[in-house]
Amino acid sequence: MSNDLTTQNSDDAGASNPLAILNAATKIADAAKEKWNSSGAAQYVKAATDNLPEGTRDVIGNVQRSIFRRENLRSFSVYTGFGEERPFYFERSPDLLIDRIRHNLTYFFLNYGVLTVFLFILSVITNPATLIKLAIIALMWVYVVKMTESGSIVIAGESCVLSTLILIQFHFMLTVSV
């Protein structure tokens, strides 16, 4: 009986062990990668990106090269301020506060993006109706990109440029998401 309790206590201790958590997260990531590769999704994504207009592909390529670089992702301890003497010190002077916010936004932008994507995925999982809204928005974006390959589109006899359509879609996204 006491041996069972010791085993249970050692299992509970392993659950709070950071290495055990990292190991479990690695197994989950490996399983997701294997599932992605076996599903053929990579071919569908490649086919979809091959059908994008050249200008759109250039913009996406530039963003990937300049923003989504691994060296821009800061470590967890740096991001959270662990080990610093005063990691959450609040600047009193507005000038210093603005400088600190500007520095943090440029230094941790990829961390903020990863956190935003994580919270977004969590919200989609917890509210399945969001998937329908996202599908509608995605279909609208695909339609606009395809229809404006020449630079503008004619709607009800009026020529609309891409920037106008983007504003309309942005307004639609705000109203649908509420």
Image (cartoon, rainbow, N blue to C red):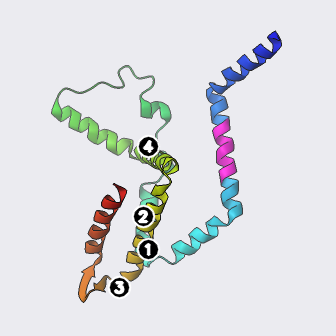
Q: Could you tell me residue 173's position as x and y percent?
A: 34, 62
The reply to whether the C-beta atoms of the residues labelled 4 and 1 are less than 8 Å apart is no
**Tag 1 or tag 4, which sits nearer the N-term?**
4
Q: Does residue 70 appear left or right of residue 172 in this picture?
A: right
Category of crowding for the residue at label 2, using alpha-carbon neighbours closer than 10 angstroms: few (below 14), some (14–19), many (at least 20):
few
Helix, strand or loop status at disc 2: helix
**Tag 4 or tag 3, which sits nearer the N-term?**
4
The magenta-colored residue range is 24-32
**Tag 3 or tag 1, which sits nearer the N-term?**
1
Q: Could you tell me residue 37's position as x and y percent?
A: 68, 60
**Tag 4 or tag 2, which sits nearer the N-term?**
2
Between circles 3 and 2, the one closer to the viewer is 3
Spatial CA distance of label 2 from label 4 is 19 Å
Spatial CA distance of label 3 from label 2 is 21 Å
- The amino acid sitting under disc 3 is Ser
Disc number at residue 150? Answer: 3
Residue 9 occupies quadrant: top right
Category of crowding for the residue at label 4, using alpha-carbon neighbours closer than 10 angstroms: few (below 14), some (14–19), many (at least 20):
some
- Picture layout, residue 88 above or below residue 79: above
Category of crowding for the residue at label 3, using alpha-carbon neighbours closer than 10 angstroms: few (below 14), some (14–19), many (at least 20):
few
- The amino acid sitting under disc 1 is Val
Q: Which residue is mark 1?
A: 142
Q: Does residue 163 appear left or right of residue 6 in this picture?
A: left
Q: Which residue is mark 2?
A: 62
Q: Could you tell me residue 4's position as x and y percent?
A: 80, 16
At a point 27% along the width and 72% down the height, the residue shown is 163
- The amino acid sitting under disc 4 is Asn
Between circles 4 and 1, the one closer to the viewer is 1
Q: Which residue is mark 4?
A: 111
At a point 83% along the width and 11% down the height, the residue shown is 1
Spatial CA distance of label 4 from label 1 is 28 Å
